[in-house]
Amino acid sequence: MTTILDKILAAKIGQIEQMLLRPVSDQAEIIVRKSLFDALYQSKTLQVISEIKRASPSKGLIAEGINPAEKATRYVDAGAVCISVLTDTPFFQGTFDDLAEVARTVDIPILCKDFIIHPIQIDYAKNAGAAVVLLIVAALEQGMLNSLYKYAVSKGLEVLVEVHDSVELDRALQLDAKIIGINNRDLRTFQVDLSRTAEIAAIFPFEEERVLISESGIWDSIDAIKVASYGASAVLVGESLMRSGEIENAVRSLQVKREVITS
Ligand SMILES: O=P(O)(O)OC[C@@H](O)[C@@H](O)c1c[nH]c2ccccc12
């Protein structure tokens, strides 16, 4: 069966061919940003990574005609720790220009949210001002995952490694990933279930200086309290914030107290 993830990855190949025709320079970033890992590690509150998400394959159009810089400023005013910007165009209506605009506007770390399968995408992310890139374990075989991880780190980027089950968690740990995200949404079926975070948190090596982020399907403080109790340091939230008329209150309501788990 061809899944949506398969379709997204197939479409990436054509985009990568285009990107390879226009390589980007490795200019140094002028803005010095805090490390995402440092901001999350042993944080006493659940931190919020707020996403700029115009559309998605499962929900269609989420927010029409938005201004990414204006949204980013409001996220920062509410105390977001990082801003995730979708840069995939065919399925999410995002662009590297969105990322660049956000990076020029705010000085917190920016996560490039895309389906990375080739180093040129990491070059584009860095060139646009990302400090963090996403690598999705389900989209990559281990050799490629490892080399993209090393490449990103060599460029001075932090990496959020996304997993969905215990086998993928093992693969992330083989890389020695420090920032691990659990996607509550199955990218093959788009089913969302917060108990994904509970299941993986139960076997997560918290004693090893790693942080866990719960991604997708977070709507309110009840969800936030739930995943914080499982051990998450942060939530990655898109749709519910994009649809909210009161962004600042919506972000703040997710910044719940968390127990710091130490060994
Ligand atoms: O809109 P939500 O349900 O709050 O989800 C945000 C984020 O987790 C989701 O956009 C996401 C998580 N992993 C991804 C990988 C690719 C694209 C998108 C994603």
Image (cartoon, rainbow, N blue to C red):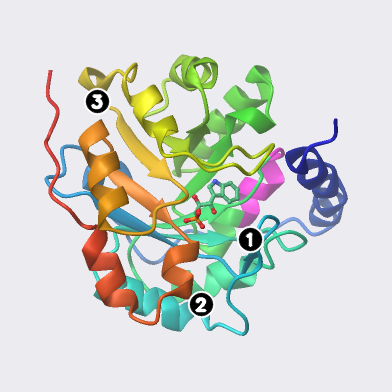
Residue found at x 59% / y 29%: 137
In magenta stretch: residue 118: yes
Where in the figure is residue 201, as x and y percent of width and height?
Answer: 33, 25
Marks 1 and 3, the one that precedes in the sequence: 1
Under mark 2, the amino acid is Pro
Secondary-structure class at tag 2: helix
- Residue 190: tell me if it is visible: yes
Where in the figure is residue 116, as x and y percent of width and height?
Answer: 66, 42
In magenta stretch: residue 220: no
Between residue 189 and residue 9, name the one nearer to us.
Answer: 189
* Label 2 sits on residue: 68
Secondary-structure class at tag 3: loop
Marks 2 and 1, the one that precedes in the sequence: 2
Residue found at x 41% / y 20%: 176
Is residue 197 left or right of 90 when viewed as pictured? left
Secondary structure mainly formed by the magenta segment: helix
Secondary-structure class at tag 1: loop
Is residue 117 left or right of 38 when viewed as pictured? right
Please give the range of residues in magenta.
117-124
The Cα atoms of the two marked residues, 1 and 3, are separated by 29 Å
* Quarter of the picture holding the C terminus: top left
Q: Is mark 3 within 8 Å of ligand 1?
A: no
